[in-house]
Structure formats: structure tokens, C-alpha cells
Amino acid sequence: MNDFENIKADLLVDCRGLSCPMPILRVKKELKSLKKGQIIELWSTDPGSKKDMPDFAKKQGDEFLGYVDEAGYTKYLIKKGG
Amino acid sequence: MKEVLPLEKTSLASDIWQEIKNGYNFIFIKDMPLWVAGIALGILAIFIFLWRYPWGISSGYGNWGDQLYYYAGLGKWIGFNKTPPLTPWFHPVSVMNFGMIFGAMGAAMMKGQFSTYRAPGREYVKGFIGGALMGVGSSFANGCIEGGFYTAVGVYSLGGFMMMIGLALGAILGVKYLIWEMLNWPVKIPNQKPLECKKTPIINWCKVYPYIGAGIYLLICLSFYIYSAFNKTVIGGMAFFGLLVGFFMQRARFCLQRTFRNPFMTGDYEMVKAVILSLIIYSAGSAVIKYGFFQPTSNGVDHRFWLGSLLGGCIFGFGMVIAGACASSGLWRAGEGNTKVWVAIVGFATVYPITKHAVSSTALGPFLGKGIYTVDIFGWTWTPVLYIGFFLLWYLLAVYNSKTEKFVITF
């Protein structure tokens, strides 16, 4: 978990307060602007994201690095794939 | 020389405790796959059909709205509600909806997942409008996504298939709107500071929630006895079935709107598979019930084929994507603490009684169509064949779309 905390993201997507499906849509949009290997950080309060984000990343061919609960939101990291 | 490993000292009591903890973890904590919920809901839907009537949700919302129109006197202006509505705790569908909310709330609490959070202002407006549109759609189709599509297909009402087409069209429009909004008029996220407690709260809610959840479950399981005391055992059963439905839906995050939305958003079709599996069980069960005359064959066949179902589906489909929940997932999301969905439910409940009245008391109703029993047209010889064909076709289309992203809306 310590490694996860140290990962530096290239872009932050703040979706606090937004519910399904906005976190997926916003991440999908921002991933387009990233290069392969760059990392996106998502802040989401929707409990659904915990299941949606890994599935979505897998489907898109990106790498889901994990999530961690912060005070008031959950932080997710996704690495753009090829 | 062999090394002798010291035996771990365990007592029978601690072994049993460990097993119970594993069981709790399995039932309440571990992620539940969608297909498990799909099977469970198919079976529960058959039970609900046998117990009373095929499963629906919207008339429960309608009952909540009726309270407002009757007791606030608003109904008189529009010319309906001459008789007082059933109280929400004696209206079978309303009771089942409460069961679902509390079933989901209990499940979220047992997992320590229950949390309410505030959404940006515009989200609440979208919630209300989406809910209102779902109310309009439901009154056209005579059922929400649950009663008008899932149950309709499950109990051989032809309108279900029409609503399905409508829902897909509506979902496409909804996704297009969300994408347009995101690109041109994005909702601003207020820069909230994370809530930091200055002092340690007296009650650590995360520790208390599982006990509240357990209390809710216990209470609703007692509903049979409570309602029996009033000679209303059937309604007690509705609360119990609602609880189970809410539990499975929340645990697996079984979301009917995802079935129609995600194929156009990302190409994901996990829900399509789960719904097909669920419907295979449901339709097989209701074939047994109807073929064997355990319940009248006309039960649940009241969806306005074809215009009502199609138009209603379109309006409902758009509304659900905007609201971020459909009628059924709205209930479990509400139970989980999603405040936007609470507003959507208010929108649904306030608009549905008006449009429902308008449709059923004017020429609009007959114009939109009437319930048609699939078996009356194709007989028991061909109906099963058509159903198998339909499930296969839907599945293959979803797989094809997932691989080619042919129908995924690009932006």
C-alpha cells in the first residue's frame, strides 16, 4: 500500500459528488488525452466506482492500479495502456 | 530427522467463531458476482408472482404520490383521488419498495458501505427531471423498466419487447446528452475540504452500522408475523421479498439501467448477460405458473403494446440516464445513501400519478395500446422457441458490440 501512496499521477479527475455513470465518462474522456504509461487519478464518492473502474480499465485495455479510501472520497489510479 | 511442527492451539469455540466469521464475510462483505444476483432475482420474481402478482415497482411510487395529492388536496384540482389512497404501509407494492430500500440499506451497512454524500446543485435538478421523466414513461408503458420490461418479458407480455427498444433509444439519447454536457457545460465540483473531525465522535458509526443493519433485517423478517396480526400476511410477505431483492441488488450492484446504457457508453455487457440469465429463469418459472394455471394467464399482461411501451421506454430510458438510476436501482441506491436518487424518487412519485391519471382516463390510453399476451399469438409451441431465439440474438448482439464497439457513442 505504501507504493500505491507514492505513485504520482499525471492528471487528476475530481468526480466527488457525481454519481454513476459520470466517473466512467469523465475518466474515459481524460484518458484520451494521455500517452501510454501515464497515470490518471480519480476522486469519486460513488460506491459503484469500486466495481466499475477496474472493469472499465480492463475493458479499455488500461491498467487499474488500485484504490484507497481517503477522508470523504475514494482515490483510484489508472495507468493508460496501449 | 523430521521437524515436529507445534500444533496450533485452537478450541472448538474459536473454530466455530472463525467459521461464522467466514460465513458473514461470504454473505455480507465479499463482492457478489452479477450472475448470482441475476439467478436470485429470477427465482425471487417467480416467488413474488406466486405469492401475489408479478413484480412491479412504479405503482408503489404512485401510492406515495397519491398521498400528497389526496392529503394536500391537490388532487381535487386535477380531478382525481376521490377516495383516500391506501396507506403506504398497507399498499403491497409500496411495502415491497420499502423492503427494497431497507434491504439495500442493511446490506450497505453490514458491509460498512453506507454513506450519504452531497452532490453539486445541478445534479439534484437532473435527478428531479430524470425522475419525473421516468414517471411519465412508466405511465405510458404501464410499468417502469422493472414492471414494463423485466417482468413484462418474464410473464410473456408483448409490450416488454417494445419497451426494450424504447429503452435502448432513450438510453442512447441520455448518453449523448451526458457527453454533450460533459464537453460543453461540465458540472463544477465544489472544492470541498475533506471532512475532518476536530474531536473524536462519541459514536463511531462505522462500528455501529452493522448492528443497525442486522436490526433492520431482523425486523423485516418479522414482518410476516406483524402483518399477520392485522390479517395481512400477504403484505408482510411483500416486505420480506423486497428485503431479499434489495439485498441481492445492492450486493451485486444489479442495475437494470446499466443493461441498456453501457453497451452504448463503453460496450460493457456484463449486465446484459446477468439479465438474460435472470429472464431465462423468470420466464421458465412463469411458463410453469401460467401453463399450469396456478395463476391467471392474464396476470401481468397489461403493458400498452405497442406505442405506449415504445414511447414510454424512450422517455423512461432518457430519464433514467439523466437521473443516474432507474426505478429499481433507485431504491437500492437510495438505501445506500445516494441523495441525488432521493430527489429522483420525489420527481417520479409526484409526476407519475398525474400522467397515469391522464393516460387512463382519456382516449390517450387506448391510443397507446393494450396488453397482449405473447402466448395468445404464438401458442405454447412457438413462444419458447421465440424466447430462446430472442435471448441468443440479444446476447450475440451485445458480444458483437463489445468487440467492435459498433454502437458505442464516440466523442
Image (cartoon, coloured by chain):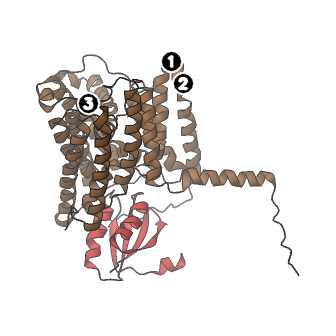
Q: Where in the figure is residue B173, as x and y percent of width and height? A: 17, 54
Instruction: Say yes or no: labels 3 and 2 on the same chain.
Output: yes
Q: CA distance from mark 3 to mark 2?
A: 37 Å
> Which picture quadrant has residue B11?
bottom right
Which numbered circle lies on residue B247?
Answer: none
Please state the chain letter of the residue tagged with numbered disc 2 in the rendered image.
B
Label 3 belongs to which residue?
A: B373
Q: Check contact, mark 2 vs mark 1: CB within 8 A.
A: yes
Q: Earlier in the sequence, mark 3 or mark 1?
A: 1
Amino acid type, callout 3: Tyr
Instruction: Say yes or no: labels 2 and 1 on the same chain.
Output: yes
Look at chain A in the picture and name its colour.
red
Please state the chain letter of the residue tagged with numbered disc 1 in the rendered image.
B
Which numbered circle lies on residue B230?
Answer: 1
> Which picture quadrant has residue B291?
top left
Q: CA distance from mark 2 to mark 1?
A: 7 Å
Label 2 belongs to which residue?
A: B226
At x 25%, y 20%, the residue is: B81
Instruction: Determine the residue located farthest toward the front in the rendered image.
Output: B381
Look at chain B in the picture and name its colour.
brown
> Which picture quadrant has residue A47?
bottom left
How packed is label 3: few (under 14 Cα within 10 Å), some, or many (20 or more)?
Answer: many
Number of numbered discs:
3
Q: Is residue B55 left or right of residue B7?
A: left
Amino acid type, callout 2: Ile
Q: Is residue B207 left or right of residue B254?
A: right
Q: Where in the figure is residue B98, as x and y percent of width and height? A: 42, 35
| Camera-side residue of B44 and B329 | B44
Instruction: Determine the residue located farthest toward the right in the rendered image.
Output: B1
Eye-nearest disc, 3 or 2: 3
Q: Secondary structure at mark 3?
A: loop
Please state the chain letter of the residue tagged with numbered disc 3 in the rendered image.
B
